[in-house]
Image (cartoon, helix red, strand yellow):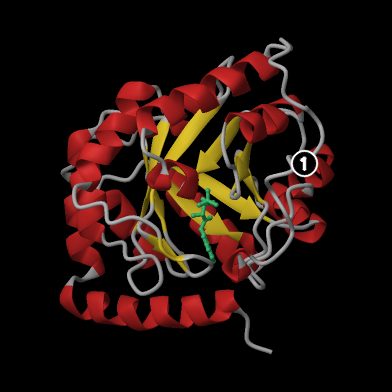
Amino acid sequence: MSTVLDSIVAGVREDLAQRQDRVSLSDLERRVSDLPGALDAEALLRADGLSLIAEVKRASPSKGALAEIADPAALADIYAAAGATAISVLTEQRRFGGSLDDLDAVRAAVRVPVLRKDFMVTDYQIWEARAHGADIVLLIVASLTDAELVRMHTLAQDLGMTALVEVHDEGETQRAVDAGARVIGVNARNLKTLEIHPDTFSRLVPLIPPGIVTVAESGIRGADDAAMYAAQGAEAVLVGETLVRGDDPAAEVRAIIDAGSAARLGLSTGAAFGTPSPSADSTPSGAS
Ligand SMILES: O=C(O)c1ccccc1NCC(=O)[C@H](O)[C@H](O)COP(=O)(O)O
């Protein structure tokens, strides 16, 4: 049976074919050779406190339109000035309303690492990400074979980038580790059903060997959730909807980092650590 992820990837492949007709791989390679090297995102994510990857996200399959974001560069600048370690930019067009133009705009605006958030299924997209200034690429284990995962991870590293290798279950976590992932994102969202399972991180984190940076992704509603994941061992969190829908993204960024960092340092912030927050549920987000 076809899943949400399958249908997203099918659209990504169609759009990709059109870009490949317009821009050759050798054009991308030339562009990459003219660029300064990528920032070392892996090192920056290994901070003492909780690192935040703040996302520029206009829409999503689970929630539809989220925020207009007329100026993605300005939003990214707000995130970075408030302390975000890295900026995630969705470049998938059909379901998320993103583009490579957004990536270019954000890259030009901030000095922190930039993640190209898309559904990567070919080496071409990795070259494309670097050519547009990305320092990090997302590799979703569920949409790659082992051979593709290893090859694309190696290519990202060869281009000086950090790969955020995303998992949602035990088998994918083992595959990520076996592929040599240095940064693993545990997505609480099941990309096949869109359900959010807040206990996914605590279930999978014991399977991730020490030394690999751990990132908790999706469904994080604010400081309490960030503190919960930090207390469970997350070194970073990736947050989209909460930041783009809130009235004051700078304050939200600071609150998430402060609460998460306090939890990582073992300080009590009053949050209910170790248990999923009451705000997070396991119903499909689109149903709410
Ligand atoms: O966000 C979705 O609905 C979605 C659906 C299918 C595939 C991927 C999807 N999101 C990509 C992401 O990983 C999130 O944008 C990211 O983790 C931030 O999530 P959130 O804070 O819940 O916006």
Horizontal arrangement in the rendering, residue 273 relative to residue 136 (left or right) = right
Q: Nearer the viewer, residue 80 or 27?
A: 80
- Which residue is nearer to you in this view: 105 or 212? 105
**Dot 1, how many residues are within 10 Å of its Cα: few (below 14), some (14-19), or many (20+)?**
some
Q: Left of 212 or right of it: where is 247? A: left
Above or below — where is 267 with respect to 181?
A: above
Tag 1: residue type?
Pro
Residue under the point 57% across and 69% down: 286
Residue at 17% of width from left, 63% of height from top? 27
Specify whether residue 32 is in view. Answer: no
Q: Is residue 128 above or below residue 286?
A: above
Q: Position of residue 102 (x, y in %)?
A: 24, 53
Could you tell me which quadrant the C terminus lies in? bottom right
The image quadrant where one finds the N terminus is bottom right
How many marks on residues? 1
At horizontal 47% and vertical 24% (from top left) the residue drawn is: 44
Between residue 275 and residue 190, name the one nearer to us: 275
Q: Is residue 93 visible?
A: yes
Classify residue 20 as left or right of residue 137.
Answer: left
Q: Quadrant of residue 228?
A: top right
Q: Quadrant for residue 248, please give it.
A: top left
54 up-or-down from 123: above or below: above
Q: Which residue is mark 1?
A: 276
Q: Among all residues in the image, which is located at the extreme bottom? A: 1
Q: Position of residue 158 (x, y in %)?
A: 42, 45
The spot of residue 89 in percent (x, y) is 35, 50
Q: Nearer the viewer, residue 25 or 65?
A: 65
Percent x, y of residue 52: 49, 31
User: In the image, is residue 6 above or below residue 171?
Assistant: below
The answer to whether residue 205 is left or right of residue 96 is: right
